[in-house]
Amino acid sequence: MARRATWAVIVSILVGTIWLGGILVFWAFWSPGFDWFQNLIVALASLLVAGGIIGAAWVSTGLTMYPK
């Protein structure tokens, strides 16, 4: 059972790191034409997607570790 939880932790760390690196690269190179509000919306939308991926990993882990 701990193997599934380890998998979810690894997914969480990887997605968080990739999200942070991606948003920093976006802000540094691809967003000079955007204003601060557009940058905020891009960051929040990408954070929502990353949270969905992490949430799916943890839900699948919880459902396999604690079946009905």
Image (spheres, rainbow, N blue to C red):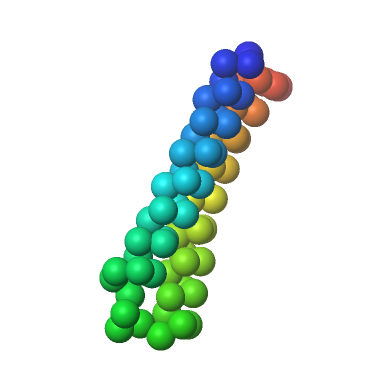
Residue 33 location, quadrant: bottom left
Image vertical order of residue 58 relative to residue 64, above or below: below
- The residue sitting at the front extreme is 28
Image vertical order of residue 23 relative to residue 52, above or below: below
**Can you give x and y, in whole percent of width and height, for residue 42 in the image?**
42, 69
Image vertical order of residue 8 relative to residue 66, above or below: below
**Can you give x and y, in whole percent of width and height, for residue 6 in the image?**
57, 23
The residue positioned 38% from the left and 56% from the top of the image is: 22
Image vertical order of residue 45 relative to residue 13, above or below: below
Count of numbered marks: 0
Quadrant for the C terminus in the image: top right
The answer to which of 46 and 36 lies nearer the viewer is 36
The residue positioned 31% from the left and 80% from the top of the image is: 32
**Can you give x and y, in whole percent of width and height, for residue 47 in the image?**
50, 58
* Residue 7 horizontal side relative to residue 34, left or right: right
- Residue 36 visible in the displayed image: yes
Residue 58 location, quadrant: top right
* Residue 4 horizontal side relative to residue 20, left or right: right
The residue positioned 41% from the left and 53% from the top of the image is: 21
**Can you give x and y, in whole percent of width and height, for residue 30 in the image?**
29, 70
- Residue 60 visible in the displayed image: no
The answer to which of 52 and 29 lies nearer the viewer is 29
Quadrant for the N terminus in the image: top right
